[in-house]
Amino acid sequence: MSISDNLHTIKDNLPNNVKLIAVSKFHSVEAIQEAYSIGQRLFGESRMQEIDQKYSLLPNDIQWHFIGHLQTNKVKVIVPYTHTIHSVDSLKLLQEIEKQAAVIGKQICCLLEIHIAREEAKYGLSFDECRKLLQDGLHNDLKYAYIGGVMGMATFTEDESQIRKEFKSLKSFYDELKKDYFPENDLFSEISMGMSDDYTIAIEEGSTMIRVGSSIFGQREY
C-alpha cells in the first residue's frame, strides 16, 4: 500500500478529537510531500539535524512536532521550527525552551514526558517528579513555553493488558494534574500516547494525539 492509502486507512478510523502526528524521522522529503499532498499537516521529527534540513525544503504550513529526547543545548536550533515539543522531562529544559522562544517571540506547546513503561531505558519524569516540578509553581511564570499536556510511551511488549494498564495510568495522571494544577487552563489539553503498534489501545484509553510512523511510511530508511 502507498503512503496515501496508509494515511487514509488510519484517518478514516480516527475519532475527531484525536490528532495524528505522522512520524517522518528517517524518511525522505518526497515521502513527507506525498503525505502532505493528501492533507496531512502534522509531522514528528526526533533529530535536530533532520528537522533543520527538511524545514526549508517543505511547505511552511506544516506543524512540526519534536518527539525525541531533547538536550538543552539543542533547544535554540529547533525552537524556530517547532510547534510542540513532546519530550520535556525537567524544569531546566522547560526554562531553556522559554528563554529561546522568548528571543523570537514564539509560543511553544510543551508536553511533560512521563515514564510509564517497565523499561528503564525510556526517558521521562516519574509521577512524583512531575508533581514536584509543578508544585514549585515556576511554570506559571513562563510566557512562551506553555505546558499543553503529557506524553508517555508504553512498554514494547505484545502483552496488551500491560500496554492498556500503562496508558490508563497516564490518562489517570493527566486527570489528576488537570484538577490540581490546570483547572482553569484550556491549553492543558493533550495526552500524547500511542504509536504504530499500540495506538488503537491508546485511543481507547483517552489519547488525544497519536505518533505513527511505520504504519504510514513503511520501515525507516536509515
Image (cartoon, grey):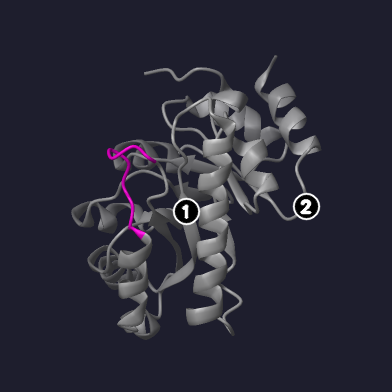
212 relative to 52 in the view: left or right: right
Q: Amino acid at mark 2?
A: Asn
Residue visible at 50% across and 17% down in the picture: 219
Classify residue 50 by image quadrant: top left
Residues packed near mark 2 inside 10 Å, few (<14), some (14 to 19) or many (20 plus): few
Q: Is residue 151 magenta?
A: no
Q: Quadrant of the C terminus?
A: top left
Which numbered disc covers residue 125?
Answer: none
Overall secondary structure of the magenta stretch? Answer: loop
Q: Which residue lies under the disc numbered 1?
A: 151
Residue 203 or residue 86, whichever sits in front: 203
Q: Secondary structure at mark 2?
A: loop
For residue 33, which quarter of the picture?
top right
Q: In this figure, which residue is indicated by the disc labeled 2? A: 16
Q: Position of residue 197 (x, y in %)?
A: 57, 28
Which range is magenta? 118-126
The label nearer to you, 2 versus 1, is 1
* Picture coordinates of residue 122, whole percent (x, y): 32, 41
In front: 201, or 98? 201
Please tell me whether residue 33 is drawn above or below residue 117 in the rendered image.
Answer: above
On screen, residue 129 versus residue 67, left or right, reads left
Image quarter of the N terminus: top right
Earlier sequence position, callout 2 versus callout 1: 2
Work out which residue is located at the far top of the displayed protein and give it. 1
- Residue placed at 28% from the left, 53% from the top? 77
Q: Residue at the location (57% across, 58% down)?
A: 171
Q: Position of residue 163 (x, y in %)?
A: 53, 38
> CA gap, disc 2 to disc 1?
19 Å
Residue 90's place in the image compared with 53, above or below, is below
Secondary structure found at label 1: strand
> Considering depth in this image, is 79 or 209 the residue closer to the camera?
209
Tell me if residue 64 comes above or below residue 45 in the rendering: below
